[in-house]
Amino acid sequence: MAEAENYPYPKPFSNKIQYERKNVIGEGNSIVYRGTYEDNEVAIKRIVLRPSLNEDREFNAQLKLTHQNILKILTVEQDADFRYIVLELCAGTLRDVCNQNYKGPDLPPAELYPFEEIGTPRH
């Protein structure tokens, strides 16, 4: 499946995005569903559009990031009420890893993560 093509986002909603409301895999300020896009299994993040907020910040930042540990955005579409951010489907969540319930591919060793540097002030 191709990565997000060079196209101004968001695109108008298409019938390429398919999901069922019972297939929720996460929620918070948005709801994430398991679904399909162009016949591939994906995660679909559905965000309620709020005219008072700049809704473009999240996906514009993520489109610029390329790293093996960051999910790729495949497309961004919207209709009158929702924005749909279509992402690669990952094997688990951070909660799964922390609770030792992760059942996906082997993760890199913990010493490869700069956790201590993230929250440590530099002197």
Image: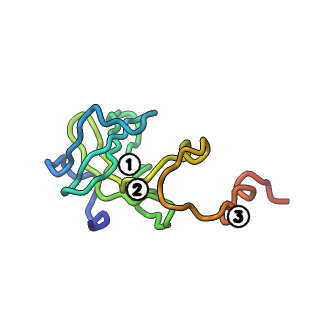
Q: How crowded is mark 3: few (under 14 residues within 10 Å), some or many (20 or more)?
A: few
Q: How crowded is mark 2: few (under 14 residues within 10 Å), some or many (20 or more)?
A: some
Three-letter code for the amino acid on which mark 1 is drawn: Asp
Q: Where is residue 32 in the image (x, y as percent from the top left)?
A: 37, 40
**What coloring was used for the rendering?**
rainbow
Kindly report the distance in space between the C-alpha atoms of the residues bearing marks 3 and 1. Answer: 34 Å
Three-letter code for the amino acid on which mark 3 is drawn: Glu
SS type, badge 2: helix
- Tell me which residue sits at (39%, 39%) in the image: 25
Does residue 107 sit above or below 101 in this rendering? below
Mark 2 or 3, nearer chain start: 2
- Tell me which residue sits at (15%, 49%) in the image: 14
Picture quadrant where residue 83 is located: top left
Residue assigned mark 3: 111
Does residue 71 sit above or below 50 in this rendering? below
- Tell me which residue sits at (41%, 37%) in the image: 53
Kindly report the distance in space between the C-alpha atoms of the residues bearing marks 2 and 3. Answer: 30 Å
Residue assigned mark 1: 56
Residue assigned mark 2: 60
SS type, badge 3: helix
Comparing 30 with 105, the one in front is 105
